[in-house]
Image: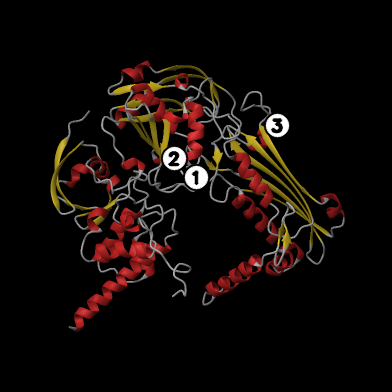
Amino acid sequence: MSEYQVLGVRTPRTDALLEASGQVVYGADIVYPDMLYAAARYSDYAHARILSVDVSEAERSPGVRGVITAKDVPVNRFGYKFQDQPVLADYKVYCKQDAIAVVAADTEAQAQLAAEKIRVEYEPLTPVLDPVEAMKDEVLVQEGSSNVVAHIKLRKGDVGAGFAAADKIVEEELSTQKVEHVPLEPHVALSELRPDGQLVITTSTSRAFAYITQLLKILRMDMTRLRVLTPAVGGAFGGKNDVSLEPWVALLTLKTGRPVKMVFSRKEEFFTTLRHPYRMKYKTGLKRDGAILARKIEIISDSGPYVCLGKDTLTKASVHAAGPYNIPNISVDSYLVYTNSALGGAMRGFGVPQVAFAHEVHTDTIAHELGMDPVEFRRKNLFYDRGEAATGQLLDSRAMRATFERALELEKKSNEGREEPRA
Amino acid sequence: MSEKVAVSLKINGKEVTLLAAPEQNLLRLLRENGYVEVKCGCEEGDCGTCTVLLDGLSVKSCVTPACACEGREVWTAAGVSRQERIGRLLRDNFAKYGASQCGFCTPGMMVTGVNYLMNNGVPDRQAIRAAISGNLCRCTGYKKIIDAIYHTAQELRRETAGEGML
């Protein structure tokens, strides 16, 4: 029991009983009278020029009330800082996850059937799927731009001098893969036109205000005419940070005058943003006693065909890349690279889990090569009682000491009574 | 479009007749008729959020054909959470132990939990783990869900033991 009334007291959530009895309303649970259902037609290629899009057969398909293509989008490029992502593919598809047209029909099955009847003529282009290949710029993903869309540099001290004074240098290459957030609730969006002319978009997102900003530009709409509402959200983990199906339902409502709903299938859920895969090179210069003199890092991030939140995640990753260790000389070069693979975005940790994996594996490798106990090596170099981060930020809290020692205690406890693994 | 057929079944204790398309699954039939507490997460039998009790057995409603439910009894999370004594106790313990975060897997977890407890579920964390292995949760890391079921099992056992002494 806590000696306080609030601190240390477990408080049940106000909606916990509703959740346990299934009474919380999520986007997919909302039904409007006279509502239409939308289904998208996605690209057949990772990289291709679009020669023609024929929606006439889809428009004649049973139950269909409207079809939208790039021609219906007022401003067909969006993005937070780089406006490089189309709402619907126009002259080319940049990846297989790009949508080309979206159909609204009386039922979901009718919409899906009609979406299959859309005829797309392509001229296939060579896709570039490997970020290291893409850096050569032999195939350009976005015309008029190098595939290296951002280079983030971080410098502390003089790494050259640090390596020159080192007794030992350890080099290592590490990579991480793409990860989907897989929220239990797939993306869902609804739109309706209210009698006063207001367009209301209800969508499963963590960032309603960021969406309004983007949707106002895409729809070229006056702020007083657009509202974005969020019902209960069934998990996001960063995967519901970016506009995806919202402009489609909005444009279909504007076209048909009817409310429109779209729910992603589990397969479509994997078409939304993923955790960026990183290729990382670590080089560390050390004294014989285990002191770290210098660390040089290179990160290549596969952004997919658009920037989205790739630059922001990579900036955060670069700041954390050297790890929580006192290192006087640090150099980090990070490259955000366009490819024709699936789009990267925000996910729990925002770039840090990738580099945390790398700097900790690298730390164990170094300890092994120096013949030191990895725990002692960490105690020697960690921001144990104080530290200076790669950015020069001074850290004087004892949180690291408390966390590190407690983690060791817990590990020891969980290993007690466990059989020694056989060699 | 295929002709719809009438399916008579008992849902949460109430007799109803619903119209189902021959290819329709039980999940869609239930949601179309307002039982939206049954959630759709994957519609391919993986995630377990659409779990319901069908004649006392927990099944994934997305891979259960609607027409095969003629004359059968269905309980959803909304129904079981009102049930004395197991359902209400588990619902309260889900709240008490913080067993839901985003809440989207919760209706399926509740049904699976009730099914475990109804079938003489013992307060054994390993057995509870096995029982909920067909239900995915992305938020909690399962610990609090297991806690809620575990403590409910313990409370139920204590009550039964008390009755035995009378």
Is residue B27 shown above or below B76? above
State the image coordinates of residue A352 (x, y, percent, origin top left). Answer: 61, 51
Amino acid type at circle 3 is: Lys
Say yes or no: labels 3 and 1 on the same chain: yes
Q: Can you tell which mark lies on residue A180?
A: 1
What residue did someone put label 2 on? A269
Say yes or no: labels 2 and 3 on the same chain: yes
Is residue A94 shown above or below A362? above
Q: Is mark 2 in CB contact (under 8 Å) with mark 1?
A: yes
Q: Secondary structure at mark 3?
A: loop
Instruction: Judge depth for marks 3 and 1 and give the one in front.
Output: 1
Q: Residue at x 17, y 34 (%)?
A: B4
Q: Secondary structure at mark 2?
A: helix
Amino acid type at circle 2 is: Glu
* Quadrant in which the N terminus of chain A is drawn: bottom left
Local packing at callout 1 (Cα closer than 10 Å; few below 14, some 14-19, many 20+) is some
